[in-house]
Each structure stands twice: as C-alpha cells, then as structure tokens.
Amino acid sequence: MQERRAEKEDSMKKIILLSMVYVCIFAVVSGLGDPAVSSAGNCSNDKVVAKLDIKALKGEDAALETVRQAYRRLANGVDVPLELVLADNGVWTVEGVSGIVPFAGTYEGKEGVLHYLEAMQESICIESLAVRFFVKQGNAIHVHLVEMGVVGSTGKRFEMEIAHVWNLDQDGMIASFREYNDTYAMAAAFDPDADPSLSLAVHRADYGIPTSSYADTLQAGIGFYAALGRADLNYLIGNSDPELVFILAGPPAITPFAGTFYGTDGFVDFLIRVFTRQQFLDIQIKTFTVDGSRLDAEFYEAVYVYATGKIFYNEGLHTVIIGDDGKLRSFRSYNDTHAVAVAYTP
C-alpha cells in the first residue's frame, strides 16, 4: 500500500513538473513568435514617447528650435510646456480613420491640442520616434520620421514612416501642425481581428539616398506634376533617374500600385498600374516646400476607381529628391492608405 502511494505521489510530481515546463516553453514561444503583438509598451505614465531621437533636426534657426522644443515636450514633459509654443488659434490635424483611431481628427486652439495629447497617451505608447530628415523653407518645417509603438487595447505593434508638417506664424508660434501617416497600418493596429503584420509598414529602400547640388528643384517639381496631371508618360519616364526609387505606402494585396518600385522599368510598371485602373477627377498641389534638392508637395486628389465604381478623396504629402541632372531620383508618398484600400475593395 505504501509503495503504491509512493508511486502515485512520484507520478503526480512528474506531471506537475512537466506542466511547469510546458508553461515556461509556451511563455517563451508566445513572447518570441509574434513580434507584432506586445502586452505592453515601454512608456511610463508621464511620457508619450519612450525614446526620442531628434539629432537629425539640426540648425540654429529659431523656428527649428521651437519645433525641437515641441518634440521634447511631447516626448518627455520637459523643457517648456507645449502650450507655450502654440498660437492661440492654432490648428492640429492627425490623419487617421475616425471611429477606429481615437486621436485622429482636427483640433483647434491650445485646449484642443491638449485633448489630442490626452487621447493619444491613453490609447498608444510610442516606443520610438526618430527623425530621418527635414525639409525647411521659411517658417514651414516638414519633419520626416520613423515611428514605432504599441496600441494599448490590442497589444499590437505598429511601425511606419510618418511626416509632420509644422507651420509657424510671424511671432514664431506654432500656427498649424499636420501628421501624415499610413492610415491603413494604424487602423490595423487598433483592429483586434486584423493580421498583426499589416501594422508593420516600413519601407526602407530610399534610406541613404543622397541629396544633390541641383539648383532648380521647384521648376523640376512643377514639370513633374504637370506631366502627371496630363498623363504624359514620355515626359515622366524621360525625366526619371535610371536608379529611381519610388515608394507608395498601402497594402499591396488590395491597392495594386502600393509598394516599392525600382528604376525606369519599375516606374513604368507603377504608371501603368495607376493609369489603367483609375481616373483622376481632381488633383491639386496645395503647397511646395523646397530645401536644396528636396521638394515636399502637399496635395489633394479625387480619384475614380474603374473596378469598383468608387471615388476616394485623398490628402497627402509627396517628398522627392531631384538628382544632379534634374531628374527624379527618389519619390515617397504619404497618403490616406485606408481610403484608397476601401475604394479598391469590392
């Protein structure tokens, strides 16, 4: 009897030990198996951004210093309070899908901006925000960044390139701010049923492409957009660099021209995909901002999709580099990827 009891106790110990091993293995595999999902971010209660890198935002200009102060305040709650560098009637806009992304929308005045910050801090943790480069002309400063973080309600990670457009008034205060981001990827991070990989949307092919000494960047940009508007393929191809890198964000499985395209052949492929699938009902360039051989163009477009009969309205930002020979060397579009994908979905 005692021997049976000893055997039974020994068996129970083995079962418990084996169960503990399985639990440990499961925990390790769960933590490593899906890097797009995380139980929590690395932000503390008093931080919106855990790690801020603004080293690339160099310059002694007063407007640049104001923008640097804004980033420091956004990230760490240090330096000067954000409201002290905001104009009283300032406008703050963040692109995103209303009803899904809690902080997407337009906010007016200092109180509006503070409401935005509260909504963002309650819903996401930005683990890393790093400046890649900026384009500055007068009091207009366009900052191009990489953002990584976690959505609190779903635990899903997001990673994408974004652009911040800052405009300062004559008193050096922030009169307007607009964030262009990958709206489809951000919405996917807030959707508990979406594939986690959809919110990881970084496109690095244009990293490291150097600027040039080209001096007539604005005229090159005007020529490019005029040719785009009249669908002049000969001009577009003839004025693109053989090593062009062309990036348009969005889900490639839905949006047929989303992705990275290389060289003249890639650019031709992109143009054919666009002009055979949709019609531009309206396209407007709202602003050109030029800094050396870099040009940023804020745009608006209304587009009809042949396959679905739907129309999408899109506000976004293009950033380009013009090469030494005046040809398009790189192109990246920050556009409303969610609106485009919805229009292409039957």
Image (tube, rainbow, N blue to C red):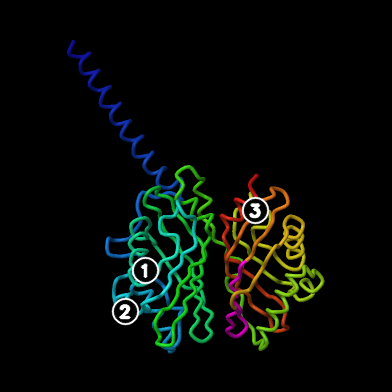
The residue pinned by badge 1 equals 113
Nearer-the-camera pick, 73 or 304 = 304
Q: Is residue 87 above or below residue 228?
A: below
Location of residue 289 by image quarter: bottom right
User: Residue at coordinates 41% horizontally, 43% vertically from top-left?
Assistant: 30
Determine the secondary structure under disc 1: helix
Position of residue 294 measured from the top left corner of the image (x, y, whole percent): 60, 80
| Dominant secondary-structure state across the stretch colored magenta | strand
Determine the secondary structure under disc 2: helix
Residue 256 placement, left or right of 129: right
Q: Which mark is residue 255?
A: 3
Residue 271 placement, left or right of 195: right
Location of residue 235 by image quarter: bottom right
Q: How far apart, in angstroms, are the residues tagged by discs 1 and 2?
A: 12 Å
Q: Quadrant location of the C terminus?
A: top right
**What residue range appears in magenta?**
288-300
The residue pinned by badge 2 equals 84
Question: Pointer 1 and pointer 2: residues touching (CB < 8 Å)?
Answer: no
- Closer to the camera: disc 2 or disc 3? 2
Amino acid identity at mark 3: Thr
Nearer-the-camera pick, 99 or 150 = 99
Question: Pointer 2 and pointer 3: residues touching (CB < 8 Å)?
Answer: no
User: Residue at coordinates 69% horizontally, 63% vertically from top-left?
Assistant: 261
Q: Earlier in the sequence, mark 3 or mark 1?
A: 1
User: Residue at coordinates 69% horizontally, 49% vertically from top-left?
Assistant: 309
Position of residue 198 measured from the top left corner of the image (x, y, whole percent): 53, 51
